[in-house]
Every structure is written in C-alpha cells, then in structure tokens.
Image (cartoon, rainbow, N blue to C red):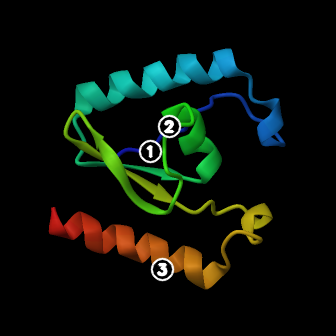
Amino acid sequence: MGLTDIIKKPTTTPKEIKENCSMKNTLRLNRAINLFSPKIVAFVGKNSFRIYSQNHAKLEYGFQYNYNGVRMYLLPSTSGQSYADTKYDEKLDWFRELRRYSLRI
C-alpha cells in the first residue's frame, strides 16, 4: 500500500489549484503507478480525481476504470467541508466497500 497526494502544494480551497500544477502532478502519479503496479489506486475526494482524470471520470464513488491494469477507485473526501455530499456513516461505508473490493481481486 502506498499513499500520495495529487497536488503537492497546500491550498485552502480547490480554486487555488492551478491547471499546470495539476498536469505535472498527474504525470508524476502515472509514473509511480507504472513503476509500482498497484492493484488499486484509490482517490479520496472528487476534486483530486477530477484533476487526475482531467474531467473524464464519472465521479461516482466506487470503481471508475482500469488504467494499465490498475483499478481506479473513488472514495468520498474525509474533509469536514464535504459533509454536504456524504455524511460520516456513508463515508465509512465507502471505505469498507473498498476493503471488500480489494479482498476480491
């Protein structure tokens, strides 16, 4: 298991993230995926996955698509600011679902 972030610059809002910074970090993450070949890459939060997928994702929680044999998976943000989207119990259910999903592959 490995953890990383798509954007290396701290921000207070998603609007602060610049597109050129996003592309550079997307390429960095793709290199890491190709180097380490994980079974699953899980993104925490729609914004990070939107940045990574360049707006080509369905942005519904759960499995998204395969990238070079790696399963891309989207989880709800753990930020307290995201409670309008999903409540704590719903977030927890998605993280548990990822665990079940990972045990099946």
Q: Of residues 38 and 46, which is closer to you in this image?
A: 46
Residue 84 lies in quadrant: bottom right
Q: Which mark is residue 73?
A: none
Q: Amino acid at mark 1?
A: Leu
**Are the residues tagged 1 and 2 within 8 Å (C-beta)?**
no
Along the horizontal axis of the image, is 70 left or right of 18?
left
Whichever of callouts 2 and 3 sits on the residue coming sooner in the sequence is 2
Which residue is identified by label 2?
Answer: 56
| N-terminal label among 3 and 1 | 1
Look at 71% across and 61% down and name the residue there. Answer: 79
Foreground mark, 3 or 1, reads 3
Identify residue type, mark 3: Asp
C-alpha separation, residue under disc 1 versus residue under disc 2: 23 Å
Crowdedness near tag 3: few (<14), some (14–19) or many (≥20) residues, C-alpha within 10 Å: few
Q: Which marked residue is nearer to the observer: mark 1 or mark 2?
A: 2
View extreme (left): residue:
105
Q: Position of residue 49 (x, y in %)?
A: 54, 43
On the image, the x and y values in percent for residue 24 come to 55, 16
Residue occupied by mark 3:
93
Task: Classify 10 Å Cα crowding around label 2: few (below 14), some (14-19), many (20 and above).
Answer: few
Q: Helix, strand or loop at disc 2?
A: loop
Of labels 1 and 2, earlier in sequence is: 1
Kindly report the distance in space between the C-alpha atoms of the residues bearing marks 2 and 3. 25 Å
Kindly indicate whether the residue at mark 3 contacts the one at mark 2 (C-beta within 8 angstroms).
Answer: no
Res 30 → quadrant? top left
Q: Tell me which residue sits at (58%, 40%) in the image.
A: 50
Q: Amino acid at mark 2?
A: His
Say what secondary structure mark 1 lies in: loop
Image spot of residue 53 (x, y percent): 49, 35
- The reply, left or right, for residue 79 in relation to residue 67 is right
Residue 3: which numbered mark, if any?
1
Q: Would you call the spot at circle 1 few (<14 residues within 10 Å), some (14-19), or many (20 or more)? A: few
